[in-house]
Amino acid sequence: MSVHESLIRELYDRLAERYIADRRNAPWNERPWLEKFLTHIPPDGSVLDLGCGAGTPIGGYLLSRGRAVTGIDTSPRLIAHCRATLLDGDWRVADMRTLALSRQFHGVIAWDSFFHLGHDAQRAMFPVFRDHALPGAMLMFTSGADHGEAYGDYHGETLYHSSLAPEEYTRRLADNGFSVVERVFNDPDCGDHCVWLAQRTH
């Protein structure tokens, strides 16, 4: 684990109020992808939001569409905000890398969170995705476009990101029972996000 990867939890918790404000004021560009995701989720289905942050806009939108949401994040301050503002959700302080809820969901989402993990931690996440996904469940996550690491700046702090190669993501999804439904790299309609939508087929 790189030193910057290990500091992600502390950074988001310490800057929680800034993150909440930034997320509230950011362009709402995830909605088209959430609609694609929800097309495959039953109207009364359940969704696991890995790295749910402040719960807005993603968790709140899923709740508004009638889905039961369980959100996990390593920041106690962000989870406290979720519990105070989105009363219908189940919000828990937890680390996605060691998650074992002993239940499965109709959908699993890791939007702008999974890519903060290092390469080996990302590889280890695919069995976690599988263990929390019902047969036929949808998985959606964001990544980089190529194998590598990147260091951004967030309010003067170093923000770590990494990505595997697209070919490795595809292989690891398949090895864990998922088939790619759609992937778009640098989506111009979604803030240049690289988005993966996959379905558990076995």
Image (spheres, helix red, strand yellow):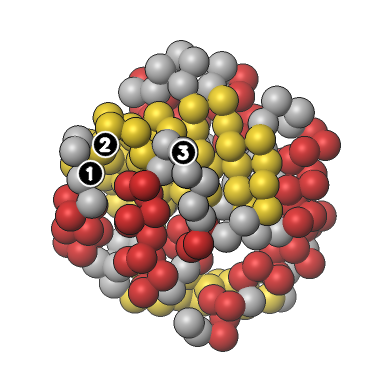
Give SS at disc 3: loop
Look at the picture and state if 10 lies above or below 67: below
Tell me if label 3 and label 2 are in contact, CB under 8 Å: no
Task: Tell me where residue 148 appears, x and y as whole percent.
Answer: 34, 76
Residues packed near mark 1 inside 10 Å, few (<14), some (14 to 19) or many (20 plus): many
Look at the picture and state if 146 lies above or below 46: below
Q: Amino acid at mark 2?
A: Gln
Look at the picture and state if 48 lies above or below 42: below
**In which quarter of the view is residue 109 placed?**
top left
The count of marks equals 3
Cα separation between marks 3 and 2: 17 Å
Pick whichever of labels 3 and 2 is earlier in the sequence. Answer: 3
Asked if residue 14 lies left or right of residue 103, the reply is right
Residue that label 3 marks: 103
Q: Amino acid at mark 3?
A: Arg
Residues packed near mark 3 inside 10 Å, few (<14), some (14 to 19) or many (20 plus): few
Q: Which residue corresponds to the image point at 39% horizontal and 54% vertical from the top-left?
A: 128
Task: Tell me where residue 162 appears, x and y as whole percent.
Answer: 41, 70
Task: Tell me where residue 68 appears, x and y as whole percent.
Answer: 56, 25
Residue that label 2 marks: 199
Residue that label 1 marks: 178
Tell me if label 1 and label 2 are in contact, CB under 8 Å: yes
Mark 3 or mark 2: which is in front? 3
